[in-house]
């Protein structure tokens, strides 16, 4: 594809970016044939699908399956039960999800009239993502070897770069949402970007948020949506403004980090009222070729005057608006919160350092000697390096599960959030703990109720931590800024209608407390959905043991599971 005056080779699904949206009805069995014609090892993960007793289809390389190697095929089969709303699918190999992703939309069994909100006239996926000219596989390799930042070239709404000017001063195409006055639109918003959390606004319009992560929330009216990588938000928008053209703006936000300039990649779509020249033939023209579309849009420009109305956006460094947005979501129904907790985990999200060669270069070592890694409880996740995925080893009770380490417990410990000097002035290594890499797991017996507190630290001050758990939803009991303090924070738990999510955005320099029931036997990845952190090791594996009966135990693997075909040693890139 060619954007910003440069032709870029990208790995995509069926020639499309974003990839095709998959529409299913709750209760459906879904079959997806993946034919890998790319030069990369690929898996596809069905983000947020619970995969009940079906961990084999979860699509995490070396955790649940061998990747689908170049020229191999694999068919994913899964059922979508007890979930309604917006989920998505994406490649689960480092960085490639930037171009391999799409919506997975689950409609109610009894049709749109059974939505617990006014029936929309139209439903529209809105995928916010980023556009990379860099070779993604190469960028991922550099990241894994300690090279720090690469930046995307632009942000996108449904694949359009939106108004960014290219080298010859020509703006890139906008995504255009055609609307009819008075009608209601259900926007199914997905953040598929590798790094940025986004603010989304439409000038002159309000959103009513009705769902998040395929779970209904109490209607919440707002003029701004905050969405972190991995999250989804369903929101109604009524076309009730004076007919015209309105910008739909997605702004990546990031907490301030004084010594670092983040490029500001705002992207703008347009919400456009159809009126006078009513060519009542539906929204088909939105999807046509560039050339044709641009000419048509020019005519529209004429009929509405010039520039669309622009919304006033939050500051790029404003994290409070996001904190406020996330704190305001509650479950539509009373949430079944398990009251008795079996296991408690306190998980510190941080950065650490390891030595490039040998062990002891941490203190006093030069910048070049240490590699920055991301950690959970000071361990950086190491993908299994053999040819046996963890799930297979676990299922067959074979060796390689034993070499894994137990995820260490870490007692709550206050972090010094005010000592910014450590981050901005001194050598970064001084602030880092020496840590190590290991394939860390935590085992849970079937049915255990687990409470986890995620604590973000001063070392994470500029990045967001959207923590995603596979195979289970998490109940978000409470969140706060600063250090978690059980003595006073437990009292803040919402045990009535807390939101149910698959991705928890841990507030910058704050904490989030969740519960989940470990009732889905298998080997499940838990990780930060911010791609740098994931690639640098902010991840762990939760093993949920089989239950007492056949129908609480993991069945055997599906037929034609990928096998190692022996021409690639590093199956992860
Ligand atoms: Cu959407 Cu493990 O990721």
Image (tube, grey):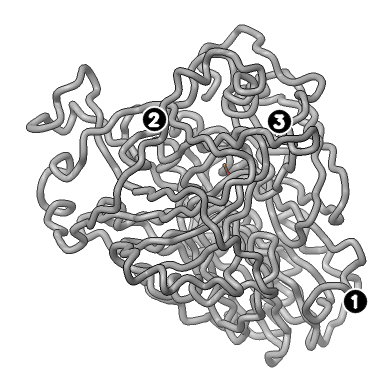
**Mark 3 element type:** helix
User: Residue 144: which disc?
Assistant: 2
Mark 2 or mark 3: whose residue is earlier in sequence? 3
- Which residue does the numbered mark 3 point to in the structure image? 56
Q: Nearer the viewer, residue 469 or 316?
A: 469
Mark 1 or mark 2: whose residue is earlier in sequence? 2
Q: Position of residue 7 (x, y in %)?
A: 56, 39
Q: Residues within 10 Å of mark 2 (few under 14, many from 20)?
A: some
How far separated are the C-alphas under marks 3 and 1?
46 Å
Question: Up-down: is 101 above or below 237?
Answer: above
Badge nearest the viewer, 1 or 2: 2
Q: Nearer the viewer, residue 288 or 17?
A: 17
Q: Position of residue 199 (x, y in %)?
A: 50, 69
Residue at screen point 73% across, 84% down: 239
- Which residue does the numbered mark 1 point to in the structure image? 280
Residue at screen point 17% across, 63% down: 418
Taking the image in four quarters, ligand 1 sits in the one at top right
Residue at screen point 69% across, 64% down: 215
In contact (CB < 8 Å): disc 1 and disc 2: no
Mark 3 or mark 1: whose residue is earlier in sequence? 3
Residue at screen point 57% across, 34% down: 543
């Amino acid at each position: 594809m060619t954007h910003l005056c440069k032709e870029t080779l990208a790995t995509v699904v069926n020639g499309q970016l974003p990839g095709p949206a998959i529409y299913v009805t709750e209760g459906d069995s879904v079959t997806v044939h993946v034919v890998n014609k790319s030069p990369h090892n690929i898996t596809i993960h069905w983000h947020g699908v619970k995969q009940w007793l079906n961990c084999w289809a979860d699509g995490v390389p070396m955790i649940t399956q061998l990747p689908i190697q170049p020229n191999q095929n694999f068919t994913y089969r899964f059922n979508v039960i007890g979930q309604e709303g917006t989920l998505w699918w994406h490649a689960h190999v480092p960085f490639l999800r930037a171009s391999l992703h799409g919506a997975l939309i689950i409609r109610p069994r009894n049709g749109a009239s059974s939505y617990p909100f006014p029936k929309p006239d139209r439903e529209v996926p809105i995928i916010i993502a980023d556009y990379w000219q860099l070779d993604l596989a190469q960028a991922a390799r550099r990241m894994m070897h300690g090279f720090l930042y690469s930046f995307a070239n632009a942000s996108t709404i449904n694949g359009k770069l939106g108004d960014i000017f290219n080298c010859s001063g020509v703006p890139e195409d906008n995504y255009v949402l055609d609307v009819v006055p008075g009608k209601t639109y259900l926007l199914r918003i997905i953040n598929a970007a590798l790094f940025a959390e986004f603010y989304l606004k439409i000038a002159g319009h309000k959103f009513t948020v009705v769902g998040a992560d395929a779970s209904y929330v109490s209607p919440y009216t707002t003029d701004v949506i905050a969405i972190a990588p991995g999250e989804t938000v369903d929101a109604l928008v009524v076309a009730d403004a004076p007919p015209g053209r309105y910008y739909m703006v997605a702004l990546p936000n990031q907490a301030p980090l004084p010594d670092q300039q983040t490029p500001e990649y705002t992207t703008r779509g347009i919400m456009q009222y159809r009126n006078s020249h009513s060519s009542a033939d539906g929204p088909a023209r939105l999807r046509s070729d560039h050339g044709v579309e641009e000419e048509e849009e020019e005519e529209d420009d004429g009929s509405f005057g010039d520039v669309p109305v622009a919304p006033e956006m939050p500051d790029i460094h404003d994290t409070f608006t996001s904190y406020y947005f996330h704190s305001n979501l509650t479950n539509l129904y009373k949430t079944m919160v398990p009251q008795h907790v079996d296991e408690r985990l306190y998980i510190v999200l941080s950065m650490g350092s390891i030595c490039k060669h040998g062990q002891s270069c941490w203190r006093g070592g030069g910048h070049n000697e240490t590699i920055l890694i991301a950690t959970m409880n000071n361990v950086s996740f190491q993908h299994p390096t053999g040819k046996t995925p963890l799930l297979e080893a676990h299922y067959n009770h074979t060796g390689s599960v034993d070499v894994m380490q137990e995820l260490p417990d870490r007692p709550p410990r206050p972090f010094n959030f005010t000592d910014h000097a450590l981050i901005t002035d001194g050598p970064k290594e001084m602030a880092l703990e020496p840590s190590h890499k290991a394939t860390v797991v935590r085992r849970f017996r079937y049915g255990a109720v687990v409470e986890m507190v995620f604590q973000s630290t001063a070392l994470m001050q500029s990045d967001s931590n959207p923590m995603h758990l596979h195979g289970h939803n998490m109940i978000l009991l409470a969140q706060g800024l600063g250090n978690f303090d059980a003595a006073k924070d437990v009292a803040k738990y919402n045990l009535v209608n807390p939101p149910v999510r698959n991705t928890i955005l841990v507030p910058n320099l704050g904490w989030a407390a969740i519960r989940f029931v470990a009732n889905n036997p298998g080997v499940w990845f838990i990780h930060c959905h911010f791609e740098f952190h994931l690639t640098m090791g902010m991840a762990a594996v939760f093993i949920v043991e089989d239950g007492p009966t056949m129908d609480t135990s993991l069945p055997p693997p599906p037929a034609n599971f990928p096998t190692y075909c022996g021409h690639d040693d590093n199956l992860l890139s």
